[in-house]
C-alpha cells in the first residue's frame, strides 16, 4: 500500500481535473457508443430510448467514480452554476471545463475506432452531416430541420435549467435530502427524464463539453467544417445556452426553495412542536382509553 502512494498526485487541482476528465470520458463513451450502435444498425440493435438510457447510465457510473473527488460535475454548465452559487472557487471553472472537453473529445475518438467499420459500411465511406446516411449525429447534437435558432436556444436553456433545479435539492439538509449513495442513480433518472421529454428538437445536449468535444472530433476525423457551418451555424447554441440555463435554474432554486426553507433553529422548533403534539395526542388517547375502561367496569 505504501508503494502505491507514490502514484498519488499531490496537486489537488490536477487530481480534480483528472476526475472530471475521466468522468466525462465515461459519460460520452456510453452515450456515443449507444448512438453509433443504434444508427449504424438502422435501429435493429437499439432505439432512440437506448441512447437516452445509455447516457443516463454513463452519468450514474461517472458520478460513482468521481463524486468523492470533485462532486462529479461532468458539465461546464454545472461547474459554472456551482461557481455562481459559491460552492466551487471560480479558479476551477476553466480547468474543469477544459478537462471535461478533453474527456468528451477522446471518448468520441474511441467510439469512432470501435465502430469504424460499421460507420463506413453505413455511410458508404462518405462522412457527412446531411442525408439518410449521415453519421455526424452519432457524436454531436443537431437540430431538427424545422427548428429555428431562437426556439432551439430556448430548448437548451429550459433543459439545463431543469437539470440544475432538480439536482440542487438532493443534498439540502433542511428539506428531504437523498441518501448520499443514491444521488448518482437519482441524477441519472433526472437526466433520463430530460432526455426522454426534451430531446426531439435538438438532442438535449444540455452540456457544452458533451457537444463541443465530439464536434471538434468530427471536424478532425473527416467530417470537415460542415459540422460547424450546418443549420445556419447552429453549433454555438449548445455551447452558449446551457450555461445560461444552468445559472437560471440555480437562481430559481434559490428563489423558490433554498431561501424559503426554515432556518435550522426554526426547523428545530418545528420538530419540537411536532414531538409535543405527538405526545399530547398519545396522552389524550391514553386518557380516553382509561375512561372507556372505567365506563366498562361501571
Image (spheres, rainbow, N blue to C red):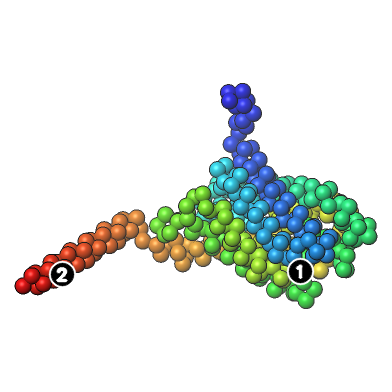
Q: Residue at coordinates 40% horizontally, 57% vertically from top-left?
A: 174
Structural distance between the alpha carbons of marks 2 and 1 = 68 Å
Q: Position of residue 156 (x, y in %)?
A: 66, 66
Q: Residue at coordinates 90% horizontally, 61% vertically from top-left?
A: 123
Residue 277 seen in the current view: yes
Q: Which residue lies furthest to the left in this view?
A: 298
Kindly identify which numbered label has been placed on residue 143.
Answer: 1
Quarter of the picture holding the N terminus: top right
Q: Is residue 18 left or right of residue 164?
A: right
Tell me the element at label 2: helix
Q: Which of 234 and 129 is in front in this view?
A: 129
Q: Where is residue 230 in the image (x, y as percent from the top left)?
A: 83, 66
Q: Circle 1: is it few (<14), some (14-19), or many (20+) Cα within 10 Å? A: many
Kindly identify which numbered label has been placed on residue 75.
Answer: none
Residues marked 2 and 1 touching at CB (< 8 Å):
no
Give the labeled residue for mark 2: 288
Quadrant housing residue 56: bottom right
Quarter of the picture holding the C terminus: bottom left
Q: Circle 2: is it few (<14), some (14-19), or many (20+) Cα within 10 Å? A: few
Q: Residue at coordinates 51% horizontally, 58% vertically from top-left?
A: 168
Q: Which residue lies furthest to the bottom in this view?
A: 146
Q: Where is residue 92 in the image (x, y as percent from the top left)?
A: 60, 45
Instruction: Name which of mark 2 and mark 1 comes first in the sequence.
Output: 1
Q: Residue at coordinates 62% horizontally, 65% vertically from top-left?
A: 194
Amino acid at each position: 500500500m505504501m508503494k502505491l502512494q507514490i502514484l498519488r498526485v499531490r496537486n489537488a487541482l490536477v487530481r480534480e481535473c483528472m476526475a472530471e476528465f475521466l468522468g466525462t470520458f465515461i459519460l460520452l463513451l456510453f452515450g456515443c457508443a449507444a448512438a453509433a450502435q443504434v444508427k449504424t444498425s438502422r435501429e435493429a440493435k437499439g432505439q432512440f430510448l437506448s441512447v437516452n438510457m445509455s447516457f443516463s447510465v454513463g452519468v450514474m457510473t461517472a458520478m460513482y467514480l468521481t463524486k468523492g473527488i470533485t462532486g462529479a460535475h461532468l458539465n461546464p454548465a454545472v461547474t459554472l452554476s456551482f461557481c455562481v452559487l459559491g460552492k466551487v472557487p471560480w479558479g476551477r471553472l476553466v480547468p474543469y471545463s477544459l478537462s471535461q472537453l478533453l474527456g468528451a473529445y477522446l471518448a468520441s475518438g474511441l467510439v469512432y475506432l470501435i465502430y469504424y467499420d460499421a460507420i463506413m459500411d453505413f455511410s458508404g465511406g462518405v462522412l457527412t452531416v446531411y442525408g439518410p446516411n449521415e453519421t455526424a449525429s452519432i457524436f454531436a447534437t443537431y437540430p431538427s430541420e424545422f427548428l429555428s435558432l431562437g426556439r432551439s436556444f430556448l430548448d437548451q436553456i429550459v433543459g439545463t435549467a431543469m437539470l440544475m433545479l432538480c439536482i440542487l435539492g438532493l443534498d439540502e439538509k433542511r428539506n428531504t435530502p437523498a441518501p448520499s449513495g443514491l444521488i448518482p442513480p437519482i441524477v441519472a433518472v433526472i437526466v433520463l427524464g430530460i432526455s426522454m421529454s426534451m430531446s426531439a428538437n435538438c438532442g438535449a445536449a444540455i452540456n457544452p463539453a458533451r457537444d463541443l468535444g465530439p464536434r471538434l472530433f468530427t471536424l478532425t476525423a473527416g467530417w470537415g467544417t460542415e459540422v460547424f457551418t450546418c443549420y445556419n451555424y447552429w453549433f454555438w447554441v449548445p455551447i452558449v445556452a446551457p450555461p445560461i440555463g444552468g445559472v437560471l435554474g440555480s437562481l430559481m432554486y434559490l428563489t423558490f426553495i433554498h431561501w424559503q426553507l426554515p432556518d435550522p433553529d426554526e426547523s428545530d422548533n418545528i420538530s419540537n412542536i411536532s414531538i409535543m403534539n405527538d405526545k399530547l395526542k398519545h396522552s389524550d388517547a391514553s386518557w380516553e382509553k382509561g375512561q372507556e375502561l372505567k365506563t366498562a367496569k361501571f
